[in-house]
Image: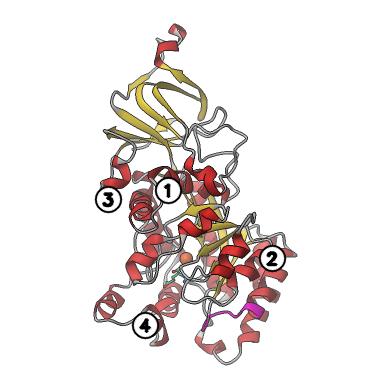
Amino acid sequence: MLITNIKALVGVHSKEKLFLRGSELNQLPILENAWLLLEDGLIKDFGLMSDLNTQYSNLNTFDATGKFVFPSWCDSHTHIVFAAPREEEFALKIAGKTYEEIAAAGGGILNSANKLQKATADELFESASIRLKDMIKQGTGALEIKSGYGLTVESELKMLRVIKRLKAAFPIPIKTTLLAAHAYPTEFKNNHQGYIDLIINELLPKVAEQGLADYIDVFCEKGFFSNEETAQILTAASNYGLKPKIHANQLSSSGAVQTGISHQAVSVDHLEETDDEVLRALSNSNTIATLLPSCSFYINIPFANAKGLIENNAIVALASDYNPGSTPSGNMNFVVSLGCIKLKMTPEQTINAATLNGAAAMELSNEVGSIAIGKTANLFITRPMTSLAYLPYSFAQSQIETVILNGEIYH
Ligand code: NIG
Ligand code: FE
């Protein structure tokens, strides 16, 4: 397929550019009045309309007059496999209860785990498929999905197998993260080591043997998993080749970021509590700082210090955190708007953070995240837009008109 008359082809980074650090995030290369050739599912070539080769004139052509072409969003942090939404907590939240109070009262993650344990794999697959289709229509073309609502060996494996089915059923790259250490199940409330031993001695060997996960995650937080507990799990997982992508500094600043970095985490995610030590730890680090502004928005917690991280030469990515408790939305267009409105990032920075750096946070930036020859042709075409900034400016709306995955229009 040939796309012609593109008003702006966005994110034309060189193929060697695998992530953007610090002020590099300002650089969003754009080709105006361009064409783009897709072949065999890949980006084959692109150029200026003034140089369009006539040999392409008999190809299937999409006229993108007035429209922008973006690389698909790369959403590197989601929990989209769950059994039921949690609207009952929404009412409590409106009445003023905090996320921690709701969790302590038996809501939260344990509530979702109860429901997931009772759900069949087919039910989980069906409901996650509906969420994923919505996300794809909203421009997501690569994502990560976590377990973490099973909290037993059997139910964590059930979740991971559902993610494996999603990988096979959907035409986008999906990475899987084992998040058994999401909360302590009630029966292990006073026996933390018992649950950690279960994860390390029973679950991890099965997950590794069956190749069911790419990464390990821990909710490293006061009232959840301590730094020492997190370190034990990350060390055990590294023996199976699972690198960390952890929940860090969401509700408190307790050293989670440093624990992740010391275990060579691919990313540390959330960072709503971005103190000076966090900025120092992530300064020039290869561990990616993944920010989730929809979560701050929904549960009314601080927004991460994106500007501080960028000034300190960190690698900043944006993701949705789609889950039933803290972020019941997987709309990356809204994430990008919040990145501008609440994190005070520029449109260019947010778009880079939600594409190339998101891909890097899944170790997929060889494959997706920018417009480069040889990369997978996962992209979206907007409605006619006046400028690049119109996309984040028109918040909570989608400017996406056409989604292309593997070089084909997605219906
Ligand atoms: O990223 N904080 C931990 N995990 C999720 C929320 C999980 C839930 O409330 O169900 C998050 O915010
Ligand atoms: Fe999360």
Name the residue beneath numbered marker 1. Answer: 350
Of mark 2 and mark 1, the one earlier in the sequence is: 2
Is residue 162 a member of the stretch shown in magenta?
no
Q: CA distance from mark 1 to mark 3?
A: 13 Å
Name the residue beneath numbered marker 2. Answer: 263
Q: Amino acid at mark 4?
A: Ile
Q: Are marks 2 and 3 in contact (CB under 8 Å)?
A: no
Q: Amino acid at mark 1?
A: Thr
Query: Looking at the rendering, which quadrant does residue 381 occupy?
Result: top left
Query: Looking at the rendering, which quadrant does residue 288 occupy?
Result: bottom right
Which structural element holds mark 3?
loop
Of mark 1 and mark 3, the one earlier in the sequence is: 1
Q: Residue at x 47, y 44 (%)?
A: 352
Binning the other alpha carbons within 10 Å of mark 4 as few (below 14), some (14 to 19) or many (20 upward) gives some
Of mark 4 and mark 1, the one earlier in the sequence is: 4
Q: Which residues are magenta?
A: 222-228
Q: Quadrant of the C terminus?
A: top left
323, 333: nearer the viewer: 333
Q: Amino acid at mark 2?
A: His
Q: CA distance from mark 2 to mark 3?
A: 37 Å
Q: Are marks 2 and 4 in contact (CB under 8 Å)?
A: no
Residue 102, disc: 4
Q: CA distance from mark 2 to mark 1?
A: 27 Å
Up the image or down, 122 lies above or below 409; here it is below
Q: From the viewer's perspective, is the residue at label 2 or at label 4 nearer?
A: 2
Which structural element holds mark 1?
helix
Q: CA distance from mark 2 to mark 4?
A: 31 Å
Residue 395, disc: 3
